[in-house]
């Protein structure tokens, strides 16, 4: 079994053939966690998870959508998070690359969602882009040592990854590790113990080489697995075994 810990199967890119994609995942014994970006996205993912037994979800408000979060969103998120196949609050965090939401609003919504996760004893899935110091500061004050943390699609420095490792924070890696310009991420993966690593696609985005430009889905994880095994000098089976166990432990997937 392989677990893709971060995809977006509620994305309109899958509107016309989701059933076919799900069938391919099942044939290849892949479980995927479909991550939400808003309250509405969370509701859509719940409906997907009800239909497909190899799909789990996270519910949450992405930093891009923070400016549109209802003032009292916690109550709605709290109820959505009780769905039996919801495994985390996510994706939540900070994005200073696009700044689609004001930074102070991003921070407030991030912290409030961490508090929801703590009340429900759920992990958090963190998005951090060009905001690593503020992300770490918030995690240190509100989350580290209290709930499991996964920083998805890791894009920070090698130095930052060392700080995260010391705190027992997981990172997930996807198709970017196969790109020609991925030297920094390759160094991060080389140093990161498999015990703190997970696999993701961020489907339909970030399709690995040699399929860049095509829509991504969880069946392309095999290219990520091959690259990680090469970087770390271990077998592909070991990469699959360790990352799957990590996902099962953190997200409670049986």
Image: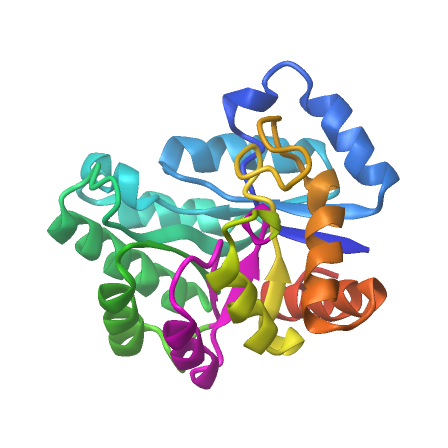
Res 244 seen here: no
The residue depicted at 53 percent of the width and 35 percent of the height is 205
Image quarter for residue 229?
bottom right
Q: Residue 212 appears at what percent x and percent y?
A: 60, 33
The residue depicted at 19 percent of the width and 38 percent of the height is 67
Q: Residue 22 appears at what percent x and percent y?
A: 74, 31
Magenta stretch contains residue 180 = no
Q: Residue 127 appears at what percent x and percent y?
A: 38, 53
Between 221 and 252, which is closer to the camera in this rendering?
A: 221
Between 158 and 23, which is closer to the camera in this rendering?
A: 158
Highlighted magenta segment, given as a residue range: 148-177
Q: Is residue 113 left or right of residue 53?
A: left
The residue depicted at 28 percent of the width and 39 percent of the height is 64
Q: Quadrant of the C terminus?
A: bottom right
Would you place residue 240 above or below residue 45 in this image? below
Magenta stretch contains residue 156 = yes
Q: Quadrant of the N terminus?
A: bottom right
Image quarter for residue 97?
top left
């Amino acid at each position: 079994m392989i677990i893709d810990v971060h995809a977006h199967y509620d994305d309109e890119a899958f509107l016309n053939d989701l059933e076919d994609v799900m069938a391919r995942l099942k044939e290849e014994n892949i479980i995927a966690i479909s991550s939400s970006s808003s309250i509405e996205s969370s509701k859509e993912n719940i409906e997907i998870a009800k239909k497909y037994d190899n799909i789990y979800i996270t519910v949450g408000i992405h930093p891009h959508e923070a400016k549109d979060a209802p003032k009292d969103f916690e109550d709605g998120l709290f109820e959505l998070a009780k769905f039996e196949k919801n495994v985390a609050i996510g994706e939540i965090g900070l994005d200073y690359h696009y700044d689609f939401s004001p930074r102070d609003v991003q921070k407030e919504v991030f912290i409030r969602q961490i508090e929801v996760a703590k009340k429900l004893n759920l992990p958090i899935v963190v998005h951090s882009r060009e905001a690593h110091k503020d992300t770490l500061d918030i995690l240190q004050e509100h989350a580290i040592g209290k709930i499991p943390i996964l920083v998805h699609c890791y894009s920070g420095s090698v130095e930052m990854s060392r700080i995260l490792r010391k705190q027992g924070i997981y990172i997930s890696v996807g198709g970017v590790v196969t790109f020609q310009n991925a030297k920094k991420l390759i160094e991060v993966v080389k140093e990161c113990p498999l015990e703190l690593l997970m696999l993701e696609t961020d489907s339909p985005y970030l399709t690995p080489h040699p399929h860049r430009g095509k829509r991504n889905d969880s069946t392309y994880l095999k290219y990520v697995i091959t690259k990680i095994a090469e970087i770390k000098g271990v077998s592909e089976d070991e990469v699959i075994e360790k990352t799957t166990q990590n996902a099962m432990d953190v997200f409670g997937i049986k």
